[in-house]
Each structure stands twice: as C-alpha cells, then as structure tokens.
Image (cartoon, rainbow, N blue to C red):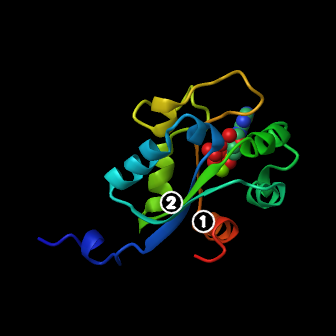
C-alpha cells in the first residue's frame, strides 16, 4: 500500500538560516558547543566568522524590535563583544535551529535546548540567551545578506 501523502509531496527545499552565537555565548566559551549541536543534528556549516557587530548592522538586524523597552539594552549587549555569525544549511534548518535554540526566555526554555541547558536569567534588562536564529525564509535571506554580504 502506498502512502499518497508521502509519495506525492515534493522533497523539501534545502534552506539556509543565520545563527548568531551572541556575545554572552562567545564570552562563556560556548561557541563550540553551539556549533557541535548544529552539526550533531545533521546540518551543514556554510560560513562561520567571528565579528564585532556595529550599531548600523544591529539597527538593520533588529529593526523589527525598534521602540520596544528591551531594544536599547539589546543593542548595547550585542555590541559588548564579538559575535560568531554562522550560516547553516539543510532541509527545515530554519525551524530546526529554532527548536535547538529553545524559547526566548531561558528560564522557560526546555531542557535539551541550547537556551534551556546553557542559559539563565541574569536579572538584566535584556535576556542574554546565547543564540539567534532566523525565524522565516524571508528573515534568513535578509539576515544572511546583512552578516555575510559575500555568501
Ligand atoms: P528570538 O531571539 O527568540 O527570536 P526576539 O523576540 O526576536 O526573540 O527578540 C530578540 C532578542 O531580544 C531575544 O533573543 C532576547 O535577547 C531579547 N528579548 C526579546 N524579548 C525580550 C523581553 O521581553 N525581555 C528582555 N529581552 C528580550
Ligand atoms: Mg527573533
């Protein structure tokens, strides 16, 4: 017996997503652990570069959050040290990496996720939650263009 729902569905397209190990993750020596989890899941690393973000890059990257109470603290935090910018590739990687990362609030992030296992609330105005992952194909294309203009 064939399963029409499976056999008639086109193979999912290969996607790319932008992952950032934020300055807290780099400072805490967790860059390798984040890369390890991406690779252990089976995704491919396409690009990786340690970068010092600029106010201009962050204004573009976090434009959707401008005006929110945590926006100023978020930009200041992201300027506080180098960020490891990564492009990862694979079917479903955009949603898949968000699952690996866990919920935005590290207190609520499930054990087994990057934020759940390695993050915590430090009582600051912005959640220092170790990683960023693009949230849609449109965001991924836009963010990869910002962080890796040549990829
Ligand atoms: P995401 O990183 O899980 O996609 P966003 O809503 O896009 O979450 O927020 C961007 C970043 O801003 C978060 O990762 C976190 O560092 C910070 N942030 C978001 N919401 C809050 C909040 O309510 N309080 C403090 N910091 C926040
Ligand atoms: Mg987001």
Q: Is residue 39 left or right of residue 51?
A: left
Q: Residue at x 62, y 68 (%)?
A: 144
- Of residue 150 and residue 95, the one placed in the foreground of this image is 150
Q: Is residue 109 left or right of residue 141?
A: left
Q: Secondary structure at mark 2?
A: helix
Residue picked out by circle 1: 140
Q: Which image quarter holds the N terminus?
A: bottom left
Q: Which image quarter holds the C terminus?
A: bottom right
- Of residue 70 and residue 30, the one placed in the foreground of this image is 30
Q: Residue furthest right?
A: 67
Q: Secondary structure at mark 1?
A: helix
Crowding at mark 2 (Cα within 10 Å: few <14, some 14-19, many 20+): many
Q: Residue at x 74, y 33 (%)?
A: 126
* Spot occupied by residue 80 in the image (x, y as percentages of width and height): 74, 41
Q: Residue at x 74, y 39 (%)?
A: 77
Residue picked out by circle 2: 94
């Amino acid at each position: 017996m064939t399963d029409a729902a499976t056999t008639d569905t086109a193979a999912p397209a290969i996607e790319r997503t932008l992952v950032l190990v934020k300055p807290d993750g780099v400072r805490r020596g967790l860059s390798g652990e984040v890369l390890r989890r991406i690779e252990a899941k089976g995704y491919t690393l396409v690009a990786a570069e340690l970068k010092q973000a600029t106010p201009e890059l962050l204004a573009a990257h976090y434009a959707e959050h401008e005006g929110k109470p945590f926006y100023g603290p978020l930009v200041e935090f992201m300027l506080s040290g180098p960020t490891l910018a990564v492009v990862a590739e694979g079917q479903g990687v955009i949603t898949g990496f968000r699952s690996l990362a866990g919920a935005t609030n590290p207190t609520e992030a499930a054990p087994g996720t990057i934020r759940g296992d390695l993050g915590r609330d430090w009582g600051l105005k912005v959640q220092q939650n170790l990683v960023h992952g693009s949230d849609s194909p449109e965001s991924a294309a836009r963010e990869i263009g910002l962080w890796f203009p040549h990829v």
